[in-house]
Amino acid sequence: MVALAPACAIAAAPYPDKPVRILANPAGGAPDFTARIIAQSLSPRMGQQFVVDNRPAAIAIEAAAKAVADGHTILITGSALWLTPYMRNSVAWDPLRDFAPVTVASTSPTLLVVPAAMPVNSVADLITLSKGRPGRLNYSSTATGTIAHIAAEQFKSMAGVDITRVPYKGAAPALVALVAGEVDMAFATTSSVMPHIRAGRLKALAISSAAPSALAPGLPTVAATLPGYEAVSIIGVFAPSKTPATVIAILNREVAAALNRPDIREKFVATGAEVVGSTPAQLTETVKQEMSRIGKMIRDAGIREE
């Protein structure tokens, strides 16, 4: 019994009992935005500082996989966690083995948009035009593996069209090229393209979520023309594998409570995202589905990280 006492004391220790590090992608992206919202909400609520530690996606993921599994290091990231292994010869982590899921924080659909002068008004029109001009239409995207890239490649695969990718170094130049008519189409975030749609510079043909979204009222889905199509950016909260179930349960409860505050939900909507706040099991299932569905498309298309 004396020998068991230290272990019991550790198990009974309150959580968190020291600052919590949140590993997230570099500043400015959705994981960083989510991490800062959660840190600001949980620090006063849980009595310890939640500190955001920004690192390149792969470095943040690897660091989280190797961290002590006590809940004092968590990871907030997107598809880089589960899709990078399909685009590289090897990675230093396994998406399912090395992480304990906490919750799906948010999802962000994209809009399929074209310049105002494009002679199409629907997804069906775009497919017909593309098939009549194989290899001549193009789309703008950002880095390899981002939602703008994956959504377009999935569209190509499911529609059976030949559209050329034009990569840009960031979302801003990709959008400028689209508005200027230098490219024919793009899948872009609702928050970035809505001002141009309202001003008549761009036309929105559809939204990439499986179901219609309040982020773009009245806009049809791509899936209405291509059944089964879905391309959304998913931001998840993870802990290192073997983090105690009690700690996961506390994190899940507290993060979900923070995300579902009305003022926080409004902040996400302003960025083109919808709060989820799922169970850990639902996050696991989401990752498995994405790996099966999008991973196969990446391999079939021969997409490799640059």
Image (cartoon, helix red, strand yellow):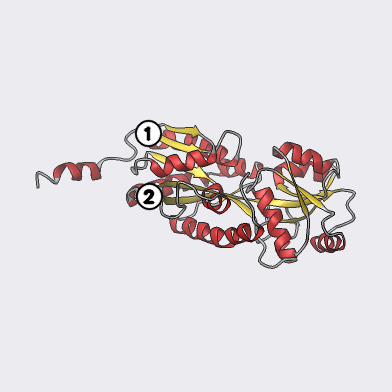
Badge 1 element:
loop
Q: Residues within 10 Å of mark 2 (few under 14, many from 20)?
A: many
Res 167 quadrant in image:
top right
Identified by mark 1, the residue type is Gly
Residue designated by label 1: 47
Q: Which residue of the protein is positioned furthest toward the left in this rendering?
A: 2
Res 269 quadrant in image:
top right
Q: Which residue of the protein is positioned furthest toward the bottom in this rendering?
A: 227
Badge 2 element:
loop
Up the image or down, 298 lies above or below 115; here it is: below
Up the image or down, 286 lies above or below 304; here it is: below
Tags 1 and 2 touching, CB below 8 Å: no
Residue drawn 55% across the image and 47% down it: 80
Residue 45 in view in this figure: yes
Question: Which of the marked residues, 1 or 2, is nearer the chain's N terminus?
Answer: 1
Residue 221 in view in this figure: no
Which part of the image, by quadrant, shows the C terminus?
Answer: top right
Question: Which label was assigned to residue 241?
Answer: 2
Q: Whole-Å distance between the Cαs marked 1 and 2?
A: 24 Å
Residue drawn 43% across the image and 42% down it: 64
- At which x and y percent is residue 128? 84, 64
